[in-house]
């Protein structure tokens, strides 16, 4: 269905209340509604949250545009909430990337095509994310009292992070490198707390507040409010 020019996916389930969720990275809107709720009732519920919904979708679409530009090898790369100018240097002996203050130097062998350049940049940003997350992981494993067996980063369509409780594995969305480092820390702590409490119940929120008192403010950095 469409609402205020926004394409919305509607799912009906055996639940009491209607839920509206907007997923990264492109702002997909999913409404989960009770089985007996009519489309007119859904429209009325959406109208109550119209301003919030439009604002949230716009934020995600702006982020998607930024990420798309980066995949097309822009002159600037957004890393940890800040813009960095990219300087490409071809004809080098080896491929490497270094960052100096507000500039990123990309060294490439001669004959690198667009896809190889994109992969070089993606692999570098992915490593930056993993390296920063590993530092945070060491810090938080002792504080929370859990051990993570594996930490990895990959492209994810609907989540900023996920965890496998049985295997104690955490996945991070590579798009996190665009945001502030505080957002990364929030997502990591969020998933680590899930290793103690799997659901988003009162106990989970109590644990989040105990470990990361400003978690609600940090959550806003993920464009979720």
Image: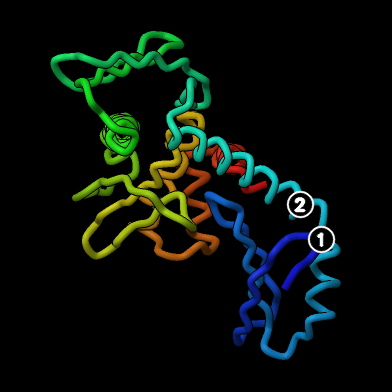
Q: Is residue 90 left or right of residue 54?
A: left
Q: Position of residue 157 (x, y in %)?
A: 46, 56
Q: Is residue 109 left or right of residue 209?
A: left
Which class describes the residues within 10 Å of circle 1: few (<14), some (14-19), or many (20+)?
few
Q: Position of residue 158 (x, y in %)?
A: 49, 58
Residue displayed at 82% across by 52% down: 51
Q: How is the image coloured?
A: rainbow
Q: Is residue 21 above or below residue 171?
A: below
Residue highlighted by disc 1: 4
Residue displayed at 76% across by 52% down: 54
Count of numbered circles on the image: 2
Q: Nearer the viewer, residue 58 or 207?
A: 58
Q: Is residue 27 left or right of residue 139?
A: right
Q: Quadrant where the N terminus lies? A: bottom right
Contact, mark 2 vs mark 1 (Cβ under 8 Å):
yes
Does dot 1 land on a helix, a strand or a loop?
loop
Does dot 2 land on a helix, a strand or a loop?
helix
Q: Nearer the viewer, residue 110 or 8?
A: 110
- Which residue of the protein is positioned furthest toward the top in this rendering? 101
Q: Is residue 147 above or below residue 180?
A: below
- Which residue of the protein is positioned furthest toward the bottom in this rendering? 36
Residue displayed at 28% across by 41% down: 141
Residue highlighted by disc 2: 54
């Amino acid at each position: 269905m469409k609402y205020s020019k926004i394409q919305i996916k509607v799912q009906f389930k055996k639940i009491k209340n209607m839920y509206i969720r907007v997923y990264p990275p492109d702002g997909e809107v999913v409404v989960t509604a009770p089985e007996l709720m009519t489309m007119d009732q859904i429209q009325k519920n959406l109208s109550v949250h119209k301003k919030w919904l439009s604002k949230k979708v716009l934020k995600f679409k702006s982020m998607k545009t930024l990420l798309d530009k980066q995949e097309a090898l822009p002159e600037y790369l957004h890393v940890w909430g800040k813009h960095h100018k990219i300087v490409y240097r071809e004809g080098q002996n080896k491929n490497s990337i270094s960052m100096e203050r507000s500039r990123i130097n990309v060294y490439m062998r001669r004959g690198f095509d667009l896809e190889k350049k994109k992969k070089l940049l993606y692999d570098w940003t992915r490593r930056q994310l993993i390296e920063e997350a590993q530092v945070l992981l060491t810090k938080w494993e002792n504080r929370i009292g859990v051990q993570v067996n594996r930490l990895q980063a990959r492209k994810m369509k609907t989540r900023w992070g996920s965890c496998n409780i049985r295997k104690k594995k955490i996945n991070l969305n590579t798009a996190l490198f665009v945001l502030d480092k505080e957002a990364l820390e929030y997502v990591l702590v969020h998933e680590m707390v899930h290793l103690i409490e799997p659901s988003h119940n009162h106990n989970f929120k109590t644990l989040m507040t105990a470990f990361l008192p400003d978690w609600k403010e940090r959550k806003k950095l993920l464009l979720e409010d």
